[in-house]
Image (tube, grey):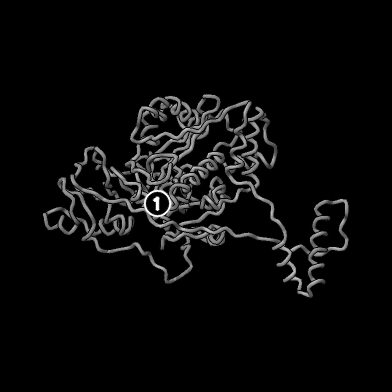
């Protein structure tokens, strides 16, 4: 049966035994809930409110009291500006594929690229979260209501701008003709002087005139960099396949064993997990099972047919070497996890995978204009492994109080000074999605959907404090579309 509504079971505040990043005992707390069924639109609204999923467990870090503040971070895919280290990484992998050259990187290049790929844009494991849930475990057989329909509404596209900075060359009479860069600077200065002398204008006006006449070099796009590995007679062949992982289908099941082997090797080698903890069932719970219900994408020949959960597989000469676990939502592609064969650790596939996922967002945006962002999970300013996310530009952080987005470049100074910070500088700005109308919250009780007020009138056992907490955590929009399961 196909479900086109969301059913969640709220757990409230959960405290972990130890922070997964700084290892502080009981230093991290979340708002948690079990996601029985979830529409892509509801999950989009949840992650725009600081939520993330790990398997079917949803959690929202409580930043004010946490030892490590976890800010939701996203990138405007079509405005992405590749850094020098990112271009070098793509070129290195292209060279390996086309010529077979796999020489080790040296010094700064190697260290910078590895540091960017260390985190592999992955979340914490959900195991600690699930262990700290109260004894009332999630109901596996939640009664499903009938004749209920919630329409997925795709919001209007948001805009992201890209700024250009052009430097003003300073005059220098002692330029050396032997240095090409100095010669170029000297020629620019002479051209500016000619404009000043000919038009009798100020230096500032002459620079503006000069800039309008200079033909700017065409910059390579992300797609052009990535496509350079697609050459005939290459030494290797890299294929990317995207398969729907939940609900599982025959195509995915055929590759399950190959995926599990790569995952097991990755967890044991890279994360030092015990072999017995990396079972096939644990892999399914963590990275295969998803609460997202597929919803068709309305667009012109999208690369995938539905919103939902997918695995993007990287096949090298017919061998699976990496997998990106992603959710495709109405406004974004959300990165869930990335794992790879440790044999290819020197290729820094984590960072390469993020570039490929950005490419996927751009393909989807050509079909669905509102789908324009790449969500990289959480950004922790005090965690060195997270810093590569700040270098994906232009990126934005979510304000934990107003739920507005702000360029990360404008937030870094605040985060240097304070662990927790309200990122919206307008003191009068408020959470537009906040409501205290608990009576209107949708609940599921005895196989019927009703408002919380009606639930109380029918003799249901209510907890106003918990409902207020839930409403604040998920926001008015989700509280009026998601169904809260009540026992």
**For mark 1, does the 10 Å Cα neighbourhood hold few (<14), some (14 to 19), or many (20 or more) residues?**
many
Q: Which residue is mark 1?
A: 47
Residue at image position (38%, 50%) is: 44
Residue 135 lies in quadrant: top left
Residue at image position (33%, 53%) is: 153
The residue nearer to you, when weighing 437 against 255, is 255
User: Which secondary structure, mark 1?
Assistant: helix
The x, y position of residue 247, in whole percent, is 33, 35
Give the answer, above or below, for where 255 lies relative to 54: above
Residue at image position (50%, 60%) is: 406
Q: Is residue 439 left or right of residue 39?
A: left
Number of callouts? 1
Which residue is most to the left?
Answer: 458
Residue at image position (11%, 55%) is: 458
The residue nearer to you, when weighing 138 against 419, is 138
Rendered-image quadrant of the N terminus:
top left
Asked if one can make out residue 131 in the rendered structure from this viewpoint, the answer is no
The x, y position of residue 409, in whole percent, is 57, 58
Asked if one can make out residue 83 in the rendered structure from this viewpoint, the answer is yes
Give the answer, above or below, for where 190 lies relative to 126: below
The residue nearer to you, when weighing 17 against 73, is 73
The x, y position of residue 30, in whole percent, is 37, 50
The x, y position of residue 118, in whole percent, is 55, 40
């Amino acid at each position: 049966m196909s479900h086109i509504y969301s059913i969640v079971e709220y757990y409230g505040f959960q405290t972990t035994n130890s922070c997964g990043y700084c290892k502080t005992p009981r230093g991290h707390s979340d708002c948690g809930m079990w996601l029985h069924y979830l529409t892509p639109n509801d999950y989009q609204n949840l992650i725009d409110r600081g939520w993330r999923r790990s398997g079917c467990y949803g959690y929202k870090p409580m930043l004010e009291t946490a030892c490590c503040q976890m800010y939701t971070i996203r990138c405007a895919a079509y405005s992405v500006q590749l850094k020098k280290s990112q271009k070098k990484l793509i070129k290195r992998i292209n060279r390996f594929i086309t010529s077979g050259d796999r020489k080790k990187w040296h010094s700064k290049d190697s260290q910078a690229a590895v540091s960017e790929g260390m985190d592999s844009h992955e979340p914490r494991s959900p195991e600690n979260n699930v262990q700290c849930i109260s004894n009332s475990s999630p109901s596996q057989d939640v009664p499903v209501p009938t004749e209920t329909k919630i329409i997925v509404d795709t919001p209007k596209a948001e805009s992201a701008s890209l700024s250009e900075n052009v430097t003003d060359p300073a005059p220098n009479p002692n330029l050396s003709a032997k240095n090409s860069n100095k010669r170029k600077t000297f020629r620019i200065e002479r051209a500016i002087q000619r404009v000043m002398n000919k038009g009798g204008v100020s230096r500032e006006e002459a620079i503006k005139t000069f800039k309008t006449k200079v033909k700017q070099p065409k910059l390579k796009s992300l797609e052009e960099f990535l496509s350079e590995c697609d050459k005939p007679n290459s030494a290797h062949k890299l294929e990317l396949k995207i398969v729907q992982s939940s609900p599982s289908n025959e195509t995915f099941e055929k590759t399950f064993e190959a995926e599990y082997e790569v995952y097991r090797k990755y967890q044991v080698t890279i994360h030092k997990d015990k072999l017995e903890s990396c079972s096939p069932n644990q892999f399914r719970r963590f990275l295969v099972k998803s609460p997202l219900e597929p919803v068709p994408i309305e667009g012109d020949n999208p690369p995938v047919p539905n919103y939902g959960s997918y695995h993007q597989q990287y096949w090298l000469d017919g061998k699976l070497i990496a997998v990106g676990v992603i959710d495709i939502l109405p406004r974004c592609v959300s990165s869930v996890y990335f794992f790879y064969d440790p044999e290819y650790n020197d290729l820094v596939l984590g960072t390469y995978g993020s570039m490929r996922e950005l490419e996927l967002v751009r393909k989807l945006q050509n079909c669905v204009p509102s789908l324009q962002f790449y969500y990289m999970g959480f950004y922790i300013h005090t965690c060195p492994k997270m810093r590569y996310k700040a270098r994906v530009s232009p990126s934005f952080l979510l304000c934990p109080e107003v739920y507005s987005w702000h360029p990360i470049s404008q937030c870094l100074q605040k985060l240097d000074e304070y662990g927790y910070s309200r990122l919206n500088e307008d003191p009068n700005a408020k959470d537009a999605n906040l409501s205290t109308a608990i009576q209107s919250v949708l609940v599921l009780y005895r196989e019927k959907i009703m408002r919380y007020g009606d639930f109380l009138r029918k003799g249901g056992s209510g907890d106003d404090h918990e409902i207020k907490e839930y409403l604040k955590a998920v926001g008015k929009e989700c509280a009026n579309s998601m169904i809260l399961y009540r026992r």
